Structures are given as structure tokens and as C-alpha cells.
Amino acid sequence: MTAENNGARSEARGRRDVTVADIARRAGVSAPTVSKVINGHSGVALDTRVRIEKIIEESGYRRIDASPPIAILEIVFQALDSLWALEIIRGVEAVARDHGLAVAITETRGRLTPGNAWIEQLLQRRPTGVIAVSSELSGRQQSQLSTRGIPLVTLDPTGEPAHDTPSVGAANWNGGLLAGRHLTSLGHRRLAMITGPDRYLCCRARRDGFVAAADAAGLPEPPVLSPAAPLYVEGGIAAADALLSAPTPPTAIFTANDLQALGVYAAAQRRGLRIPDDLSVVGFDDLPFVRWSNPPLTTIRQPLTDMGAAAAHILIGPSTGTPPSPIRVELPVALVARASTAPPHRHGQ
Amino acid sequence: MTAENNGARSEARGRRDVTVADIARRAGVSAPTVSKVINGHSGVALDTRVRIEKIIEESGYRRIDASPPIAILEIVFQALDSLWALEIIRGVEAVARDHGLAVAITETRGRLTPGNAWIEQLLQRRPTGVIAVSSELSGRQQSQLSTRGIPLVTLDPTGEPAHDTPSVGAANWNGGLLAGRHLTSLGHRRLAMITGPDRYLCCRARRDGFVAAADAAGLPEPPVLSPAAPLYVEGGIAAADALLSAPTPPTAIFTANDLQALGVYAAAQRRGLRIPDDLSVVGFDDLPFVRWSNPPLTTIRQPLTDMGAAAAHILIGPSTGTPPSPIRVELPVALVARASTAPPHRHGQ
DNA sequence: CTGAAAGCGCTTACAG
DNA sequence: CTGAAAGCGCTTACAG
């Protein structure tokens, strides 16, 4: 008996599979210690653990008696409550489908880092790959995945992207810049922005790009920035109310996403402000229904479906077995000018 | 060490798993002989083989280190392009989550019956259950599932519900009735409805309920029914254009879903018709964003999230192993009166 | 924190 | 055709 094993469906393999014993030998430790590392048990010194993890990684270790990975791509969302999520799902699904994979969805219910119950369950499913959308796996969770050869991609990462995790995002800073330029070139001088939660890097990038555009246009005053508001309609309403109550209110508002922009619509409506005559509004995302809002919303289009597809490709691409290279894919963004923006002070009909 | 095993993720189980050794004991043979039978190797007398196979069957033997059926609920959609789908996903996800199950999504891209490639892949995944949303599995597909003990539930069934498949839906006929009553009690006499594709039973039920309300109110003429229109904004625009071009246009339009209602908004806007002053509109679904449309849409609320949750419960409930009983769950529907409806001919401000 | 020892479920090679 | 023995990959319990 050579390459064949037991306790497992023997699959024809060119080379002998690497075993726990192999790893132990290379790491100069015993098999039980390696076993502990693989299963995330405690009782292993940090440096030993790190050394072993590295060797596991290099060797491409996989349990010999493990069932083959399930043909599933897992997506983790913080919340599943906006078309935003569905657009991403569609992109992932289209690519997964073409490769005979299903798509599994879980929601962390607002938690930035999914719980450990989640990862345990996921590990049992042995998916082909994982896409974390606006979520951050803990270091332990990341190594649990890599130990088992399950690749991870971050979509629209919320914080410092981990060094070795590929990520996909949009050109957020550029989007903010486009919004700012559009408004200043229309002649607006008193700009404001409703910002999103600070922990999202994407929101900060949008804000910085917007401020940069105002700066480049030589505006006398920088844009007024609202305190961070939730990325929902309600968040937009509250922030817009505050902004529009100022002694000299802005003539144009850029929002961190489309939902907030709809909130600005509602707040403006209540005050009898007409859009775009009295107030210009620019959103971010270009969700399918905003072209049907009244008036149709000018917004920065983020290619959510393409982003989902790109993430899926990164996961599926290396079907040869090579782990995905640590890369960052940044997809372009575009201004979609519709009817919610116009030159300022255009009163009358 | 007793029920614990190795070479496998040990899962807490109430009862000890049956092993090859157990079977050997019961069959009065050695473990290697049982092993040969299981793996289809030669060198076992026919009667021995038959006896062992019988015991394996009875004992429900499963390799201890084999992966258990995957803890996944599969949802099949025809299209994944509306918040409608996401609401259902959320409902399923919440229940699945509580039971440690993931949710997998596939899209048939407009096909009423998913392809056979889909079911082959699904069978390999061994999901815990399947929810078909507005789709119909072929008889063969249904029996492929039932053979493997994978339960199926139909959500919002499009046609004749199969006799033995449980289904979940909304009180569509009643919803149509509510819409009609609301409009007639407001004083409307010239009603119209934009209908959905005929193959959807839900759309026909909505229409029939609406017509029944008009009838009950003693209207001189039955509602004008548009030809079947796609359940999207564009479908609503085209159908509304036709309806509003009539010599004596309707004063109120009921649509087969919210997206179509937004299409009516767009068509009305183009003609300079104000809602609700010149035209009342009632939608169906109550998608989250329609309360932010301008004016906020009066609509029939369909509890999509609850429907998803109900479907998941039917699948998960019989965790004892009994198949779900053939039932139909019909969830109630409610009128959500907002600002898109008013008495007719209320011209002036 | 570490690993020798024992054990598990399963399979192979081979003697009868 | 059958099974005792040896072996595999992995894990657990526990002594140091």
C-alpha cells in the first residue's frame, strides 16, 4: 500500500497525500500537536502554532478522509435588508452557476465579525470558497479557513484589508470626487454630505473624494459634513433635517448611499423644498429603483453585480489548486446624471 | 472512549453510531468482510454478501467519517431581481439560522421548471430541504427528491399545486378584494387593473378578488383589465399608458405588484396627471421602499418574510424524520393605506 | 506546552 | 471464501 489510504474514499491522485505526520515531521513536533492546530484547539504555544500553520499552508494539506468540498460559494452579509445585497448575490450566483456551484447566504445580523457558531457550521459544509461582504473575519476564523484550504475574499472591505486576503471593491474615493465635481460644475457653492458610519472604509473614501472635489473647485468653504448616519432612508431623513435647518442651508447634498438620498427626498418634501429646483441631491449605488424615484435620482453607479462576479471569479479561478493571490480588485464607478440635480437657486417653474 | 470517534469531526449524538464492527458482529462475520461488501469488492460469498447488505440496510449504517447531509435549505427562484426575492430569503434565513442551517440560492433565469443540471448538482449537495419559489419542479425532479428523503415546499405556487407537496402562499384573492373595496369605498367608479402574467395563479387570484369587489359594490361597469404585463416597472408603464389613453380613462388603477405601480407613477407623471388627485394607485406586495415613493404608495401588504419563514418551518419542523404533511399555508394580507389613493376627481390643490 | 501511548474506524495484504 | 494481523490517518486523555 502506497498512496492509497483507507478510512476514506481513495481518489486517484498523482502524488502521495500529505498527512498530519508529514507536517509534524517538517515542523519538528508530534502529530497530536499538529492535530490541535488544525482543529483550533488550545494548548499550543503561539510560535509553534504559527510555524505549523505556515507549513500547513505551504503543503496544501487536506484531510485525506475528508469528503470533497461542497460545490458552494458562501456569502456572509451583515444585513440582508437592501437591494444592495441582492445585486451582489446576483453577480455571485451568475458566475457560480456557470461553474456548477450553488450560493449560500448567511446574515450576521449587524455584527461586523460573524460568530463562532457560524464558522463551525460553515466548516462542516466545506464550501468551495467564502465571500465576506462588509464583514471582517477574526484572525482565528481566517486561519480556520486557510487551514482547510477554503479561500476567502472580502467584498467592499470595511477596514484594513488583511494582508493576505484578496478583496474586491469599488472606486469609492473616485465616486466621491465625481459627485463633488458634478455639483460644483453645476455652480453649487454650499455643499453638504451625509456621511455613513465611520467604521466603513468605503464611506470615508467617498467623503474624502467629495471634499477633494470641493477643494479643487476652490470653494470658499469645505462641504458641511453631517455626523455619521445609518445607511438607510431614516438615517437620511434625520441627517437632512439637521442640515436643512442651518441658517444658510446647503444647495446640494451628497449622500453615502441611495437609501439616504431617498431620506433627503422625504425631508425636503416635508419642508416644501423642491428637488432639484431648491435642492440638488446625489446618491451612491444606483439601486435599480432609484431611476423611478420622483424625480429620478442622480447617483454614483457602483457595479455591485460585477463586484459579486469578480469575487466569485477570484474564488473559482484557481481551480488548479493554487491559492488565490493576494490582490485587490477595484471596479470603476460612474456618475449617472438624472433629474435630482440642477444649478442652484433655479427658482420658478 | 465510547461514542466518540476520530478520523472524523465528532458530533454530539444521542446514540452511538453504528460501525463496521457492529455490523460484523450482528452478521457473525469479521470486519474486513463487511468492508468488502460496503466497497463492492469481490471475494465474498453471495449469501454472506446478501445477509450483510440486509443488515447494513436495516441498521442505517453510514460511514462515521462521511459527511452528514448538508445543513442547507435550498431556495430556487425564477429571477433574483427584486426586493421581493430578498424578503423571502430573509424569512428563510432567519429560521434556518436558528436551526444551524445555511441557505442556498439558485436562479432559473426565468424558466418555470429548473433544468436537470440544477437538480443533479442539488442532489450532490444533499440539502436538508428545498423551497421552490414561483417555480414548478417536473414530476421526475419531485420524485428524485422524495426518493432521497429531501422534502420540498412550494412558495407562492404558480399553477396547480401538486397533491403531495406542501405549499405556502398569501391570500391573493382577498388582497384583490381589499384593493377593490378600498377604491370603491373612496367613491371610484371607473376602475382598472394591470394584470400579471396569466401563468401565475397568484395574479389571477388578485384579479378575481378585485373584480369581485367591484361587482359587490354594484359598479355599472366591471374594471378594465389590461393585457397581462410583466411584473416590472416597465410593464406598468406600458400598460398604464394604454389604460390612460382611453377616451374615458380610469380614475383608479390597481396593479399586480408594486413595481408595476411605480410604472403607473411614471406614466402619470409624463401625462401631467397628479397622484392621488387625478389618479389613485394601489399596488401589491409592500416592498420596503414604496413607503418612500412620492407619494407614498397605498398597497396590499404581503408578508413575504413570514412566508419564507413558514416554508422553512415546514421543511425543518419534521426533524424527527417524518415527512411534512401535504398542507397549504395561506398567510393573511392587509391593506396599507398611504397617500396614493384619494376620492376621485378631487381637482384643485 | 508538549508528546508517548492508546485508541478509533476503517482497509489492505495475506495465510489458511 | 474468510478473517487474524498489521497498518493507515487521525484524535483523545493524560503524564510530564
Image: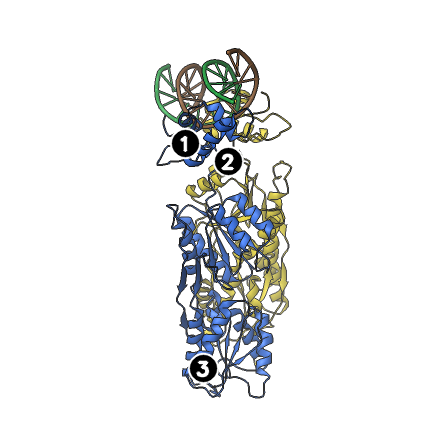
Chain colours: A yellow, B blue, C brown, D green
Between tags 3 and 2, which lies in front? 3
Labelled disc at residue B280: none
Q: Are marks 1 and 2 on the same chain?
A: no
Give the spatial CA distance, label 3 vs label 1: 65 Å
Give whichever of discs 3 and 1 has the lower sequence position. Answer: 1
Whether residue B49 is situated above or below residue A161 in the rendered picture: above
Give the spatial CA distance, label 1 vs label 2: 33 Å
Q: Quadrant of residue A16?
A: top right
Labelled disc at residue B18: 1
Amino acid type of the residue that numbered disc 3 sits on in the rendered structure: Ala
Q: Quadrant of residue B91?
A: bottom left
Q: Few, some or many C-alpha atoms within 10 Å of disc 3 (few <14, some 14-19, many ≥20)? A: many
Q: Are marks 3 and 2 on the same chain?
A: no
Labelled disc at residue A143: 2
Name the residue nearer the viewer: D8 or B268. D8
Amino acid type of the residue that numbered disc 1 sits on in the rendered structure: Val
Where residue B88 appears, as percent x and y from the top left, is 47, 58
Residue drawn where x is 43% and y is 53% of the image: B312
Where residue A185 appears, as percent x and y from the top left, is 64, 67
Amino acid type of the residue that numbered disc 2 sits on in the rendered structure: Ser
* Contact (Cβ within 8 Å) of mark 3 with mark 2: no
